[in-house]
Image (tube, rainbow, N blue to C red):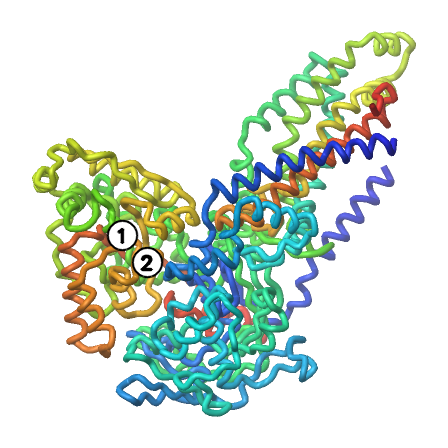
Amino acid sequence: MLTFIGRKFLAMIPTLFGVSILVFVIFNVVGDDPVYLYLGKNATAEDVEILRQSLGLDKPLWMQYLVSMKELLTFDLGYSMSSKQKITDMFIKGAGPSIALTLPALIMYSGISIILGLVCAFYRGTWVDKSIAVLATIGMSISYVAVMIFAQYFIAFMPIEKWGIELFPITGYETGFPDCIPYIILPNLITVFVALGYNTRFFRSIAVEEMNKDYIRTARAYGANTRTILFKHVLKNIMIPIIARVVVTLPFMITGSFLLEQFFVVPGLGYKLLHAIESADFKVVRTFTMLIATLVVITNAFADILNSMVDPRVKLS
Amino acid sequence: MKKFLAFILMASITTLVACSKKSGEQGLKVLEYGAVAVAGSSDPNDYASMYDLDLGSLVYDTLYEYDYLARPFKLIPGMAESMPVVTNGNKTYTIKLKKGMEYIDDKCFEKTNGKGREAVASDFVFNLYRKADSQSKSQNWWLFSGQIAGLDGLREKYKGKEFNYDEKIDDLKAIDEHTIQFTLKKPFPQIMWVLAMAGLTLYPKECVDFYGEDFDNHPIGTGPFRMVEWQKNAKYTLVRNEKYRLDLYPSEGEAQDKAAGRLADAGAKLPFADKVIVHEFSQSQPYWLQFRAGKAAWGRVPGEFTEEVFNIKSREGNKKLWEKDADNRRVLAESYGKKYGYYPLPLLDFIYRAFNYEDEIVGGEKGKKLRQAIMLAHNINEENDLFYNGLNKVYNGIIPPGVGGFDDKTANPYQGPDLEKAKKLLAEAGYPGGKGLPELQYCGGNNARTMEQAANFIRNVKRIGVKIRYDAMRFAELSAKLKQKRCQMMGLAWGGDWPDAQNFIQLAYGPNKSPGSNNANYDSPKLNKIYEQASVMPDTPERNKLYAEMNAIAIEDSAYMGSMARTRDYLIPFGTKNFKPEEMIHTHAKYIRLDKWDNKEK
């Protein structure tokens, strides 16, 4: 196992190196010039030159790349040019709200959709299956933005306007637990609603495939009850695609949901990234991109390890 | 099942605990409001937008401030004891500070174990030195650049090097702890407006040294409030600064102030609020819902909600005819009229398109007829009706309504639409029917409305055979392109920094060309000469005449297309007292009182 983990981490190096080169080229070679933005509306050519020097943009590209790599590897990222915050602080403070907004939803919609998927597969072709399929399709057909606008208006705003009852805050976020709870319930419910359809359909299809296998027929013939068939046999055997699907979404849990954070004004990483992009804050965007890349690589390795644990047929080779 | 019920019970208790958190705020006078924009910086060295000033003005006090109720604008002493003594041919300013004004307590005051010290004259000198320090990357150096010889000298001397903050100069100094004196190279009549900007405050050098780059996150001022939390790009929370100087609600105002009850608190001690929470949004929908839910002491009607808020009498094509009252003000729809008062605020605004005067095709004298033809092909009134509900003020030239030098009768012979004349001028420019003219490039923002406006403009101009390609870009990219003179045409807007036409005419002053504020790179020796002459003159009819002359030159040269000024629609809940909208003033929060506070006290 340790050899496998070690090998996985070694394999990450060329991937991350490639990403770092790509990111550097995008932001430092073909991207916007941040100098003009930060000098304000009354800059002089001389100001441009001085700022260029102070940001190190007058140095050769290879040297700029090495400096940026050193900053990333030592976590000495300096300050964001747009928000004037320490970049490491931005990430530490932003990760909490992002996770609070997405992780409960992930647990909820994964759990519910796995159960619904199994139920659909078991009752395949019956009214139960058809009803859930129709509801899932409806859920999939409504855009995320529409659900957000609808929920914010009808669930958060309207009760206040009509009856003076605040079921959920319309926007905002309070740092720390449990202060954050009222602010994260509605965004999480929205995510559950939007993700449920897709996931139920996905889990249904893999469960249906599993239900068609010989061993299920044998189990039925031996008189195994529904619960045993679904949760002991089918669920165990479809864990690999479930793990794969859940784990690949984990990095994006941490980096947050851009739209949700923007609409509900939650200072998570997604919201911060949007502002950084708008402000051509290339240092923040670059760090963010590298963070996502690193998380993706790590979680993929993690998924491989989990798969080998739930299914001994998967070899860590 | 038992476990499940226990979980539900725990979750409910947790939620209740969370919901009851606000109980600690009971009895506090909490003022909340919002904006569809974010403050980028709290550091007085870096204010770049009115939203930065909104934040800065609450935590930092200024030497002078706008008289809250007076119109036309009037300045009154803030941190200064009185108005400055101006000598030496309007060049030397001596300003006495009020005594005993202390900074908020903070750990950066190491010598006094965290107790904030008195604000002294040398703190103002430090502020200007820091702006002159090229390594501090100040966004506000332009305010004093070229004004004080000694300061310019220091800037030059330490350009790109470590600045010596201990070096003394004669024309900017603290005569004693409570007296500031500076001498300008030449009279700068707008200096008083500059001194009322939050960036020209006093702040302690030791705190800048202590926090370094993190100073932006620790504003240390003498303003009416102090910051307790800043969720960047989302909200900031301030509480009353108990050490704030004695500041009283104004006792005089306009007749309408008396009628609106804005003088009822005359002489009362400011600020009224114990706590201020400012919510920042990037989308207008949540902002608007938050306001309508009673979570904001005032609100600006976002453009897309105008038709919902005001009654429309009838429509004629794109034009909406609004129902108006006896005072010629639009009438609120019934559901809004029951809850809010309405206050239309004309903004000191210059919304315009410009041609790059250095461009080979559209620029200079050579491109003049082409520019004029393009202007004549467009219909700005139609644009106003289509995109601004017909509510903008359309005017000619570069001086907006509301400042000296503006004349509603100013004519622009090249204001469209006049397609025949446009075609004739296009032919005279050497491009009959657009033949031989390459596709022109037009740079602007990438939000939906800006792009639709651009499409309308392009469609209009196409009628005479001129083809234009729109390059939509993010503000950062647009800014960089303009500063590098890489746009042929551009769509821009300028909000006044102070109520004087000079602030707008400087956009057409040759030496301010990109990367300065003159993004059109317009350069007329005639206008430049008059600008230099007018720039040292006090506010007199003679100066306004020169302003009008420069306006006429800019119109004739046709480097700028336009113009429009917006009217901002403010809704004020009936329970909000003393709110008088004005975007040149950034200190509203200290004057506001809410009825619900009084009800709680009773």
Q: Earlier in the sequence, mark 2 or mark 1?
A: 1
Indicate the chain on which mark 2 is placed.
Answer: B
**Residue at mark 2 shares a chain with residue at mark 1:** yes
Question: Residue A174: x percent and y percent?
Answer: 65, 56
Q: Are marks 2 and 1 in contact (CB under 8 Å)?
A: yes
Spot occupied by residue B585 in the image (x, y as percentages of width and height): 39, 70
Which SS class for mark 1? strand
Percent x, y of residue A117: 72, 22
Q: Residue at image x 67%, y 37%?
A: A16
Q: For residue B494, which numbered disc appears in the image?
A: 2
- How many neighbours does mark 2 have within 10 angstroms: few (below 14), some (14-19), or many (20 or more)? some
Label drawn at residue B352: 1
Q: Chain of mark 1?
A: B
Q: Quadrant of the N terminus of chain A?
A: top right
Q: Amino acid at mark 2?
A: Trp
Q: Quadrant of residue B326?
A: bottom left
A193 relative to B552, above or below: above
Relative to residue B583, is residue B368 depicted above or below?
above
**Residue lying at the far right of the rendered structure:** A222
The residue at 88%/22% (across/down) is A312
Placement of B186 over or under B497, stated as above or below: below
Tell which of A208 and B91 is nearer to you: B91
Q: Is residue B602 visible?
A: no
Residue B189: image x %, image y %? 28, 77
